[in-house]
Image (cartoon, grey):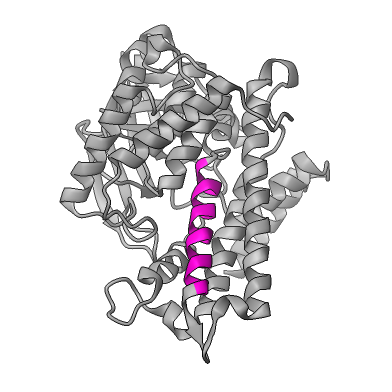
């Protein structure tokens, strides 16, 4: 893995950094205002900012010019994402940029690419990933949303739940069952569903810390056959392949590093018992551990980007470490910061007594909901099999375990 960057790449980094800093409001407080809790005015601002960044090509620098990008490579994409991540902002169309768009690039027809990709690249369209169901969260193969062929359409009926959203979506990147098969994952297909299609309704869900999530109900929703993405009954495989685009982002570690730098400064300026917090050896040890964690997170992200840039030689990445460590660090770090701050760490933004703008309590709340991209336990199962080569539990034993659990109820 090459740790250096070319002069052209460093120039791109500087240009992107200057642009994002000049366009981000001076009163923006990263870690307090997030895409999970925005006013109408803030939502309108971030949507407008997304469109402006799209015009510059900064949403999809690694995409071809024909699809709205800058025609650069994965390394350049990682550089721009890293600089954007450091600002603390987040694009409203995260799912379109990191999940649905790359999947269309790989599995879409030429007509689908022409229809869907420009809206993602220019920041106009917003997509939601609609996978999770009441009985199909970590068990992604257990999709019950049904898609039945009907002439030139598929008719969808069923429900999705805990779907993260920032604004009303233009499209839903949807998994649905198209055949009853054994094993189950061989009968699932991917559909690109208009978000305002007749028969679709949304119901807001409250969640601890993570912000706006919804139930999505599909009631006889007609989807044209040309909106089937990839091969019929191969949607599970297509979706799993696209996850590597979602989970290898360089922006997360960049923001974590910025947050740590700000917290270190807070510890230098805040006194306890007449001494700055930074002089406490236990505080220094904790901050050092956070710095080590973030460096590990950064290296994992860049290793994934590098691997993808060499994909033709190396093949698909066999396993992902970034999602696993992101979940560990996202819960560990707010707890460390709360321990350092004491009771002040529990005060929310807006309290007149809150220190560090109440950002620690906000991060702690968000870290209570780490289910996106699979639970920590599921991450461990994947790493055990693909990373360590450990044997899987035979399917017949899983069935026996499931039956025993049902009988216990």
Q: Is residue 290 above or below residue 182?
A: below
- Residue nearer the viewer, 228 or 115: 115
Q: Position of residue 309 (x, y in %)?
A: 63, 22
Q: Is 40 placed left or right of 107 in the picture?
A: left
Q: Residue furthest left?
A: 41
Q: Is residue 212 above or below residue 361?
A: above
Q: Is 179 placed left or right of 41 in the picture?
A: right
Is residue 370 at least partly visible in the picture? Answer: yes
- Residue at position x 30%, y 46% in the image: 166
- Residue at position x 65%, y 72% in the image: 284
| Dominant secondary-structure state across the stretch colored magenta | helix
Image quadrant of residue 303? top right
Is residue 179 at least partly visible in the picture? Answer: no
Q: Is residue 265 above or below residue 396?
A: below
Q: Is 360 placed left or right of 316 in the picture?
A: left
Q: Position of residue 37 (x, y in %)?
A: 29, 57
Q: Is residue 246 above or below residue 12?
A: below
Image quadrant containing the C terminus: bottom right
Q: Is 127 placed left or right of 47 in the picture?
A: right
- Residue nearer the viewer, 28 or 155: 28
Say if the magenta span includes residue 269.
no
Say if the magenta span includes residue 254.
yes
- Residue nearer the viewer, 200 or 128: 128
Image: magenta residue range: 251-268
């Amino acid at each position: 893995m090459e740790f250096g960057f070319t002069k052209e790449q460093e120039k791109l980094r500087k240009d992107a950094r200057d642009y994002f800093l000049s366009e981000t409001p001076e009163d923006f407080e990263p870690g307090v205002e997030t895409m999970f809790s925005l006013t109408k005015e803030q939502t309108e601002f971030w949507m407008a900012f997304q469109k402006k960044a799209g015009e510059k090509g900064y949403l999809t620098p690694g995409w071809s010019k024909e699809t709205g990008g800058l025609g650069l490579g994965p390394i350049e994409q990682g550089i721009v994402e890293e600089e954007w991540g450091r600002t603390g902002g987040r694009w409203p169309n995260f799912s379109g940029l990191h999940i649905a768009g790359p999947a269309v690039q790989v599995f879409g027809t030429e007509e689908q690419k022409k229809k869907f990709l420009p809206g993602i690249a220019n920041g106009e369209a917003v997509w939601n990933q609609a996978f999770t169901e009441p009985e199909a969260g970590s068990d992604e193969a257990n999709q019950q949303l049904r898609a039945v062929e009907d002439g030139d359409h598929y008719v969808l009926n069923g429900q999705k739940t805990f779907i993260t959203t920032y604004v009303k979506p233009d499209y839903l990147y949807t998994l649905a069952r198209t055949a009853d098969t054994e094993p189950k994952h061989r009968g699932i297909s991917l559909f690109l569903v208009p978000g305002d299609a007749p028969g679709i309704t949304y119901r807001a869900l409250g969640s601890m810390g993570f912000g706006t999530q919804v139930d999505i109900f599909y009631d006889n929703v007609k989807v044209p056959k040309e909106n089937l993405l990839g091969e019929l009954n191969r949607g599970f495989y297509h979706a799993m392949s696209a996850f590597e685009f979602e989970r290898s982002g360089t922006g997360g570690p960049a923001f974590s590093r910025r947050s740590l730098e700000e917290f270190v400064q807070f510890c230098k300026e805040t006194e306890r018992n007449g001494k700055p917090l930074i002089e406490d050896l236990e505080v220094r040890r904790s901050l050092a551990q956070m710095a080590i964690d973030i460096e590990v997170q950064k290296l994992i992200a860049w290793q994934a980007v590098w691997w993808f840039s060499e994909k033709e030689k190396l093949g698909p990445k066999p396993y992902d470490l970034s999602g696993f460590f992101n979940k560990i660090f996202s819960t560990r770090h707010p707890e460390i910061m709360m321990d350092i701050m004491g009771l002040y760490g529990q005060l929310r933004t807006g309290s007149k007594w809150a220190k560090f703008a109440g950002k620690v309590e906000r991060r702690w709340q968000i870290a209570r909901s780490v289910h996106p991209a699979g639970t920590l336990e599921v991450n461990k199962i994947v790493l055990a099999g693909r990373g360590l080569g450990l044997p899987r539990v035979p399917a017949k034993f899983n069935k026996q375990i499931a039956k025993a659990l049902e009988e216990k109820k």
